[in-house]
Amino acid sequence: MPSAEHPLTGRCACGAVRFQVTEPFDSAGFCHCHRCQRRSGVPWTFNGLVAPSGFELTAGAEEVTTWVPEDGGRPKSFCRRCGGHVFGGDPEGELSIAVRLGCVEGDPEVEPSWRAWLSSAPDWYEVPDDDLEHFPESRR
C-alpha cells in the first residue's frame, strides 16, 4: 500500500506533471457522470480516493491547469502540455483527491468498490453486472 516510505508515483502522458500518493486509498471506483465522460472520452473513469494529506505534486505544478465547474462540481486538473487528466479535487482542500488510476506507475493496491452517477451512464454501452455498490448519482 502507498505510504511515506513506499510512495506510489504517477504522471501525465508526457511526464511533465508528476505526483506521489503517500497514504492508502480510502476507496476506488468508477464514475459514470457526463463530466467524466466528456473530459476523458470514455463511458466511465477509474479513480482512487485519497486524503489530501496523502497526495503531493512532485514535478510540473506550473503545468497543471484546473477547471472548476460553474455549478459547484469538484475541480478537475490536467496537464496543459499533453491534456492528461491527473486528478480531481483540491490538494489544499478538505475533501478527498480523486487520483486517475490510469496515471499511476504501479499497483495502487485498491480494488474498485463502487460505481457512481449511473443515472448518467450512456444507454448505448451496458454497465457491467458486477458486485460493486451502485449509486444513481454522487456517493456523498
Image (cartoon, rainbow, N blue to C red):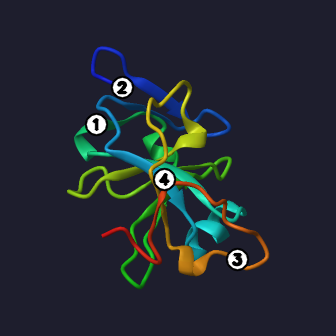
Q: Residues within 10 Å of mark 1 (few under 14, many from 20)?
A: many
Q: Secondary structure at mark 4?
A: strand
**Residue 7 horizontal/vertical position (percent):** 37, 22
Instruction: Count neighbours of disc 3 (C-alpha within 10 A) and say few if under 14, some if 14 to 19, many if 20 or more.
Output: some
**Picture disc at residue 54:** 1
At numbered mark 2, what does the secondary structure look like: helix, strand or loop? loop
Q: Is residue 117 left or right of residue 41?
A: left
For the residues bearing labels 2 and 3, Cβ distance under 8 angstroms: no
Q: CA distance from mark 2 to mark 1?
A: 9 Å
Residue underneath mark 4: 29
Mark nearer the viewer, 2 or 4:
4
Distance from label 1 to label 3 (Cα)? 33 Å
Tell me the residue at 24%/52% (across/down). Answer: 92
Of the two numbered discs 2 and 1 on the same chain, state the one appearing first in sequence. 2
Local SS, label 1: helix
Residue 80 seen anywhere in this rendered image of the structure: yes
